[in-house]
Amino acid sequence: MSLPLTKPSPPGAIGVEGSHTPAEKFFAKFRALRLGRAWLFRLGVIFPTLVAIVYYGLIAAPQYVSVSQFIVRSVNNAQTSGFDAFFRTFGISRAVDDTNVVQNFILSRDAVAALDKKLNLRKIFENPKADIVARYPPPFFKDSNERLYRYYQSHVTVIQGTSQGIATLRVATFDAASAQKIAAALMGLAEGMVNQLNDRAQHDSVKASEETKALAEQNLLKAQAALTAFRNKEAMVDPDKNSVADLETSSTLALDLAQTLVQMRQNVEAAPAGPVNAVLSAKAKALQQAVDRQRAAIAGGNGALVDKMSEYDQLKLSRDIAQKSFEGSVASLETARQEARRKQIYLEEVVQPSLPDVADEPQRWRMILTVFASTFAVFAVLWLIAVGASEHAQ
């Protein structure tokens, strides 16, 4: 029995028909188009590199970069070493979180809107010196706030140092003076934002203490007014002093009464019918009435000095409590203000915005080499995959 003759498969055929994987089918078509390694290298590596050479070598306009450095500090007594220790020697410490806040503000839409209002940012970016690719607005796009914001982000960067906490602001434009102007304006806006944060934090932390002080002051004024009304009603400044005088008067009258009674008793024993006895008796009676009136004025019921002293002591105690509360609220307010000042942050410019005299961007050779390296890497990966798929199919 003879076997059926089959036509041998051509070299490079992939497996049996119907058993191809998607990757094998893709690379089979790739080989069917006869797009070899040379053409792939030319299209994927040489051509993009030539475009980069033409653009960065002949078309790309020079850009000037203004550099400024700043640091955000807050008052703190924490101990550390190194660069931070130098600042903390003067009671100043790094505020990393606040530096992030400043960085986010510089790269925010609010900063773009403020700069556009202050410097006419659109006009600066629409510099006729810019090339057609890098000019604002970009080719095939219309002017809009969102487009301006994205263009701004590509020309303004903030890099925060991790060791020393110094942040670096870089502004790139097609004019050196404009770059410096934008950097200086950004630092001014950032400082204003920091001051606004300080004012808001101080207001929030001190507001409660100020309200407590105002309430304590009102209570003190009410207590003092009640005490003054009592004094005017009773026609006495200090019942305590009046009570001392009344007690001294009562004691003097009682002593005089006792002496008169002793003298009268002696005269009665010596001369019962003597005329002096009647005088002494009248004097003793008058003294007794004076003593009774004085005692009644001191502790004789409603309107007595004791009742007045009790009401006065209550009013005085209320006034003293209100006074202590007011003094405590004043001390708390001062403490809150000191704490708010201690938590304030400060933006210090370590390096003023520079005026560049040489264009730093674009870094032409670096960009050309970057394009070549990236496209070559992609080409190498694709070619290795193609070779691996071919070997697997065989």
Image (cartoon, helix red, strand yellow):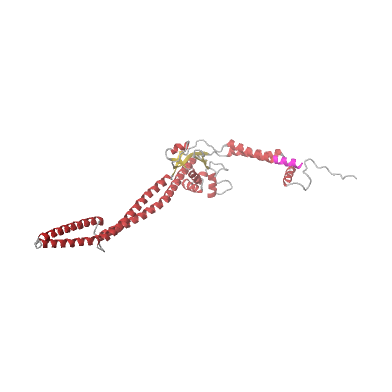
With respect to residue 163, does 209 lie above or below?
A: below
With respect to residue 34, does 211 lie above or below?
A: below
Closer to the camera in the image, 225 or 31: 225
x and y, in percent, of residue 56 in the image: 59, 38
Image quadrant containing the N terminus: top right
- Magenta highlight on residue 386: yes
Residue 277 visible somewhere in the drawing: yes
Asked which quadrant contains residue 224, the reply is bottom left
x and y, in percent, of residue 201 in the image: 44, 49
x and y, in percent, of residue 288 in the image: 18, 61
Closer to the camera in the image, 66 or 325: 325
The prevailing secondary structure element of the residues shown in magenta is: helix
Q: Residue at x 32, y 56 (%)?
A: 317
Left or right: 62 with respect to 352?
Answer: right
- Magenta highlight on residue 257: no
Asked which quadrant contains residue 47, the reply is top right
Q: Residue at x 19, y 60 (%)?
A: 291
Left or right: 185 with respect to 50?
Answer: left
Look at the image and give the residue range highlighted in magenta.
Answer: 384-394
